[in-house]
Amino acid sequence: MLKIDNVSKSYTTPRGELSILANVSLTLARGQAAAIMGPSGSGKSTLLYIVGALDRPTSGSVTLDGADPYTLDESRQAAFRNEHIGFVFQDHSLLPQLSVLENVLTPTLVASSASTSGGDEKRAREILDQVGLGSRLDHRPGELSGGEKQRAAIARALIRNPTLLLCDEPTGNLDASIADSVADLLLDLHRTHNTILVVVTHSPALAERFPARYRMADRALVVA
Ligand SMILES: Nc1ncnc2c1ncn2[C@@H]1O[C@H](COP(=O)(O)OP(=O)(O)O)[C@@H](O)[C@H]1O
Ligand SMILES: [Mg+2]
């Protein structure tokens, strides 16, 4: 269960306090998915980073299965993120010098701080099969299309079997038909892996496919 409880975020700027989020609350159970829309600059990414244990809220709390990552010290917080949360960003953020298989395995390297286990590699191959890249394991990201890069990024986000999958404009850089197939894949994997899925998107076509839709409006989350 993901519980976002009265989260607010503000920045102190030379011109004074700048409020970005005000009392945002949302609860999602295992297996639930939500899309968050809203204009550019409305705080969507800020909210996603707070939910993803990457950016501390000014007030309020975020808990995942009862655990609040912001009560942990920095290294435990990083470990929490690595173990429980998968991220997919608009620009895939794959490492260009690594193969597709190595990219998908990077979260497991951080986890053990040693070498990857045979089990990790087996799982990586399985997930790459599921995203349709089973025959591209040795390719570098530069050899993949935009849609394929995003598929690899999704595989990487799922490698540690996260409770929570967060996607920030995951199809924002893709053509409509490719975006559609990446969306199919995301929703399909969300169901088979039983994650909690939160997707931030500009695209009404993507948002429409989610049973729960919200919109950032005046620093708060409202039902869309
Ligand atoms: N470190 C910061 N200091 C001040 N303002 C910031 C900082 N980071 C983000 N913002 C502001 O927060 C607002 C929301 O940004 P963001 O969450 O990226 O919006 P969105 O993802 O909806 O486009 C923007 O106005 C942005 O300029
Ligand atoms: Mg954003």
Image (spheres, grey):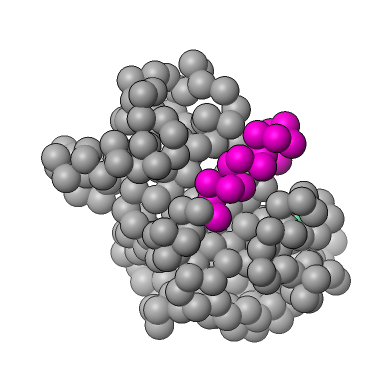
Q: Nearer the viewer, residue 111 or 75?
A: 111
Is residue 184 shown in magenta? yes
Q: Residue furthest top?
A: 143
Q: Is residue 126 left or right of residue 36?
A: left
**Residue at 15% across, 42% down:** 117
Question: How many numbered discs?
Answer: 0
Q: Nearer the viewer, residue 96 or 33?
A: 33
Measured along the vertical axis of the image, is residue 109 above or below residue 69? above
Q: Position of residue 12 (x, y in %)?
A: 72, 64
Q: Nearer the viewer, residue 90 or 188?
A: 188
- Quarter of the image for residue 91 reads top right
Q: Position of residue 223 (x, y in %)?
A: 77, 76
Q: Is residue 43 left or right of residue 96?
A: right
Q: Position of residue 152 (x, y in %)?
A: 45, 35
Magenta segment:
172-187
**Magenta stretch, main secondary structure class:** helix
> Can residue 127 be seen by looking at this rendering?
yes
